[in-house]
Amino acid sequence: MSFSLGFFTFMSRFVLIFVALALLLASLALAKRVAPAKVEPVIYQGIRYIAPNDDGRRAYIEAWDVRTNKKLWDVTVFTNRIDPKLEEDVQWVFVTTLNVRDGTLIVTSERGKIYFVDVNTKAVTQSERPNT
C-alpha cells in the first residue's frame, strides 16, 4: 500500500513539473517574433533598391547597379532604441514595403511609419502622418 501511495505522489509531482515546464516553454515561444517579411526590391533608372531586413536595430536601404550588380551605397532609414530591460527581438522593427515615385523611395515600417529617401542626395525624411 505504501508503494502505490509513494508512486502516486511521485507521478503527481512529475506531472505538475512537466505541465509547469510546458507552460514556461510556451510563454517563451510566444515572446519570440516571427521572421520579417521579405521586401520586394524596386528598380528605378537602372538601380535596384533593397531593404535587407537583417538587423532589427537599424533599417537601411542598399542601392545596386542592375547592370554590374555592384553595390553603390546604403543609407540608414531609421534606428530602434532597445530597452535592455525588455526582450530585444520583440522590440525590433523592420521595413515592410519599398516603392519609388519621382526619384524618392517610399519606405514603410512595421509600425506604419513612412519615410522618404531622396535617391540623389540620400536624404531621409519621415512623413508627419502615419500610414493608415
Image: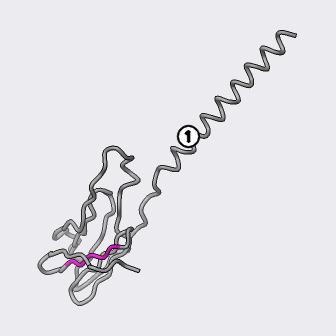
Where residue 41 appears, x then y in whole percent?
Answer: 33, 75
Where residue 100 appears, x then y in whole percent?
Answer: 28, 84
Asked if the magenta segment contains residue 115, the reply would be yes
Q: Nearer the viewer, residue 129 or 47?
A: 129
Work out which quarter of the rendered image holds the N terminus and state it.
top right
Using the rendered view, name the quadrant where residue 95 is placed.
Answer: bottom left
Residue at the extreme left of the image, as rendered: 121
Residue drawn 15% across the image and 75% down it? 122
Residue at the extreme top of the image, as rendered: 2
Asked if the magenta segment contains residue 25, the reply would be no
Q: Which residues are drawn in magenta?
A: 113-117
Q: Nearer the viewer, residue 13 or 72?
A: 13
Q: What is the tally of numbered marks visible in this picture?
A: 1
Q: Secondary structure under badge 1?
A: helix
Q: Residues within 10 Å of mark 1 (few under 14, many from 20)?
A: few
Residue drawn 82% across the image and 15% down it? 5
Q: As displayed, is residue 32 above or below residue 107?
A: above
The residue at which mark 1 appears reads as: 25
Residue at the extreme bottom of the image, as rendered: 102
Q: Main secondary structure of the magenta part?
A: strand
Determine whether, in the image, residue 57 is placed left or right of residue 9: left
The amino acid type, in three-letter code, at marker 1 is Leu
Where residue 72 appears, x then y in whole percent?
Answer: 16, 71
Residue drawn 68% across the image and 30% down it? 16
Q: Nearer the viewer, residue 81 or 29?
A: 81
Residue drawn 43% across the image and 66% down it? 37
Work out which quarter of the rendered image holds the C terminus and state it.
bottom left
Determine whether, in the image, residue 74 is placed left or right of residue 94: left
Q: How is the image coloured?
A: one colour
